Image (tube, helix red, strand yellow):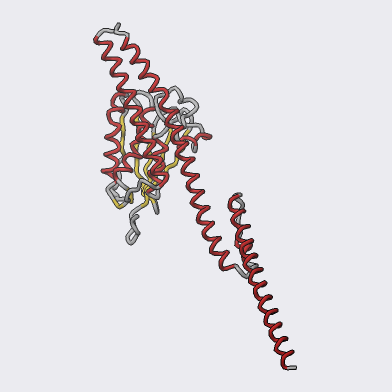
């Protein structure tokens, strides 16, 4: 009887061990199958939800795998976005370079013929230089804007004199305004120190002023006035140009956008685009209001200096 009991115990133990091994194998196979399903879903680009791995006992392992897959997915999306941005940048550069490059090649062929006088040769050489400078400016500006968009290029903003920043921006367009007989008038205002970067803000304001001078008629004026608001310092730049249609208010700040009636004018469509990027980096912004035939008014908003405010 004792021997029978011993055999029974042995058989029971073997049975339990076999059942335990079977359960372990089932658990491992189930976990591997679930992991395989998640990896397959990831490869297909399907959305993997947290609830998909909360109903199983292996949730801890799968949750960790899920976190790794999500991080990998974000990095993949980021890489894809950067690839698309680079492709768009190269496409824009290629498109913008075609005209000046074609002009350089044409002028060079004319010079190679050797039928021009010395004075005519100098004229064509000067034209080539102007086209080369335009290409250089386009590349520099577009790359700068692209780096600002991606956060590769950064700069500090701090309380600084607005008078000095305005003077620097006006100086950059003074020669162009003088050639057209345009007066740049600045209304008297109380000195203030909004939070901005003088160098970069002067470039942004200079681009807006250049746009105003470019499209204003001979002998007209561009007026600048400063208004303190509750949270911002508002800088208004009013010109006497042809105005901007209301349906183009947002479009004019897009990269390479040229107004429907401005396609024959000299310009690249980058100035206002870059100005908006710079102001956004300073937590400021720019708006426009206009009536066709009555000029345009660009309003730039810079954060006011407040005691205890964190400088970024």
Residue 49, position in %: x, y? 61, 59
Q: Residue at x 63, y 71 (%)?
A: 24
Please indicate, yes or no, whether residue 194 appears anywhere in the rendered image: no
Q: Answer with left or right where residue 184 lies relative to residue 85.
A: left
Where is 68 relative to 302, above or below? Answer: below
Q: Nearer the viewer, residue 267 or 232?
A: 267
Can you say which quadrant of the picture contains the N terminus? bottom right
Q: Residue furthest front?
A: 3
Please indicate, yes or no, whether residue 264 appears anywhere in the rendered image: yes
Q: Nearer the viewer, residue 178 or 64?
A: 64
- Residue 100 lies in quadrant: top left
Residue 197, position in %: x, y? 31, 47
Q: Answer with left or right where residue 21 lies relative to residue 183.
A: right
Q: Residue at x 35, y 28 (%)?
A: 135
Q: Residue furthest left?
A: 118
Q: Residue at x 33, y 62 (%)?
A: 308
Q: Residue at x 51, y 54 (%)?
A: 72
Q: Nearer the viewer, residue 298 or 116?
A: 116
Residue 117, position in %: x, y? 26, 7
Q: Residue furthest bottom?
A: 1
Can you say which quadrant of the picture contains the C terminus? bottom left
């Amino acid at each position: 009887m004792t021997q029978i009991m011993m055999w029974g115990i042995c058989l029971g133990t073997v049975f339990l061990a076999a059942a335990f091994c079977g359960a372990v194998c089932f658990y491992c196979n189930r976990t591997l199958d679930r992991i395989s399903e998640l990896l397959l879903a990831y490869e297909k680009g399907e959305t993997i939800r947290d609830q998909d791995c909360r109903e199983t006992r292996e949730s801890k392992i799968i949750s960790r795998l899920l976190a790794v897959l999500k991080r990998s997915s974000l990095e993949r999306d980021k890489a894809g976005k950067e690839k698309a941005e680079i492709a768009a940048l190269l496409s824009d550069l290629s498109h913008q370079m075609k005209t000046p490059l074609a002009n350089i090649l044409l002028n060079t062929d004319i010079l190679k013929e050797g039928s021009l006088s010395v004075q005519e040769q100098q004229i064509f050489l000067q034209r080539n230089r102007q086209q080369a400078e335009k290409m250089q400016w386009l590349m520099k500006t577009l790359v700068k804007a692209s780096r600002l968009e991606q956060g590769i290029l950064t700069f500090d903003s701090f309380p600084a004199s607005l008078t000095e920043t305005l003077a620097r921006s006006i100086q950059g367009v003074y020669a162009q305004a003088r050639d057209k007989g345009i007066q740049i008038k600045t209304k008297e205002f109380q000195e203030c120190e909004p939070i901005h970067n003088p160098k970069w803000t002067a470039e942004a304001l200079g681009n807006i002023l250049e746009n105003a001078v470019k499209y204003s008629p001979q002998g007209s004026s561009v007026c600048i006035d400063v208004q303190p608001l509750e949270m911002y310092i508002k800088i208004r730049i009013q010109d006497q140009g042809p105005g901007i249609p209301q349906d183009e208010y947002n479009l004019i700040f897009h990269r390479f956008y040229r107004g429907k009636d401005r396609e024959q004018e000299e310009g690249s469509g980058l100035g206002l685009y870059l100005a908006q990027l710079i102001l956004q980096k300073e937590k400021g912004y720019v708006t426009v209001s206009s009536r066709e035939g009555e000029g345009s008014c660009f309003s730039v908003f810079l954060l006011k200096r407040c005691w205890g405010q964190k400088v970024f």
